[in-house]
Amino acid sequence: WLDFSLTGMTDAELKKFMIEEAGLGLNEGVQFGPGGEGYMRMNLACPRPVLMKALKQLKHALEKRMAEG
């Protein structure tokens, strides 16, 4: 579980950010019930290079968003 609650994005904004800016298809926390708001689920059951690529994409997208203010 990845906690994005401090980003200030709504769940809809977070989903759009993941797809359009990070290029990732993660599971929305709200799909799993109350308390999932602001969270995304990342499946780690994948080859290490795939995981590393996804984490780099996420890092780059978050850094870009923070720089834009």
Image: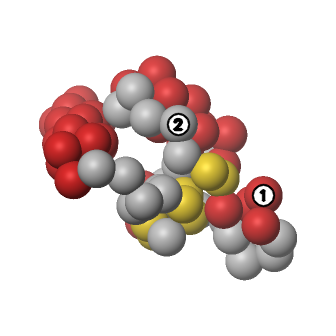
Residue most extreme to the right: 33
Q: Which residue is mark 1?
A: 31
Q: Residue at x 59, y 39 (%)?
A: 15
- In the picture, residue 56 is in which quadrant? top left
| Image point (62%, 51%), residue name | 27
Image quarter (top left, top right, bottom left or bottom right) of the C terminus: top left
**Residue drawn at (44%, 35%) of the image:** 24
Does residue 58 lie above or below 7 as drawn?
A: above
Disc sitting over residue 11 in the figure: none
- In the rendered image, residue 9, in percent from the top left (x then y), is placed at 53, 49
Residue neighbourhood size for the residue with mark 1, other residues' Cα within 10 Å, grouped as few (<14), some (14–19), many (≥20): few
Local secondary structure at mark 2: loop
Q: Kindly report the distance in space between the C-alpha atoms of the residues bearing marks 2 and 1.
A: 14 Å
Q: Relative to residue 54, is residue 21 depicted above or below? A: above
Q: Secondary structure at mark 1?
A: helix
Q: Is residue 30 left or right of residue 54?
A: right
Residue 19, image x and y in percent? 50, 28
> According to the image, label 2 marks what residue?
25
Say which label, 2 or 1, has the lower sequence index.
2
- Residue that sits furthest to the bottom in the current view: 35
Q: Residue at x 54, y 58 (%)?
A: 40
- How did the renderer colour the structure? secondary structure
Residue ranking furthest to the front = 47
Residue 69 in sight from this viewpoint = no
Front-most of 44 and 4? 44
Q: Amino acid at mark 1?
A: Gln
Which residue sits furthest top? 20
Can residue 30 be seen from the camera position used here? Answer: yes
Query: Where is residue 35 shown, x and y percent of the image?
Result: 72, 77
Identified by mark 2, the residue type is Gly
